Amino acid sequence: MVRHAFSGRHADSGANDVSFCGKRFCLAKPSEMDWIQAPSCQDCNSLLKALKG
């Protein structure tokens, strides 16, 4: 399991969406343990860092 980054707000999302790294995923509400145990997607992180400058 890997955490991906998505643009927008969760409340505005549908059943699936495209992450910053370009992959489409079904969206689920993660548990607190999911956030703790799953590493972040390095491609999403790199793209977000590049956007920040």
Image: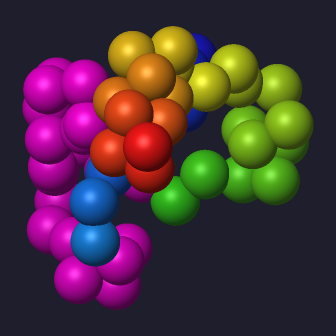
Q: Residue at x 14, y 26 (%)?
A: 22
> Residue 44 location, x and y as percent?
40, 28
On screen, residue 8 above or below 50 = below
Q: Which residue is drawn at 44% across and 50% down?
A: 52
Tell me if residue 21 comes above or below residue 19 in the rendering. Answer: above
Left or right: 17, with 41 as reference point: left
**14 w.r.t. 41: above or below:** below
Q: What span is in magenta? A: 9-28
Residue situated furthest bottom in the rendering: 11
Seen from the viewer's position, the closer of residues 45 and 33 is 45
In the image, residue 30 above or below residue 40: below
Q: 3 left or right of 37?
A: left
Give the camera-side residue of 28 and 24. 24
Residue 18 sits inside the magenta stretch:
yes
Lateral position of residue 52 relative to residue 39, left or right: left
Residue 3 is situated, as x and y percent measured from the top left of the image, at 54, 32
Within the image, what quadrant is residue 21 found in? top left
Q: Where is residue 26 in the image (x, y as percent from the top left)?
A: 24, 42
Is residue 4 among the parts visible in the rendering? no
Instruction: Report the residue at 17% width, 59% height from top.
Output: 15
Query: On the rendered image, what quadrant is the N terminus found in?
Result: top right
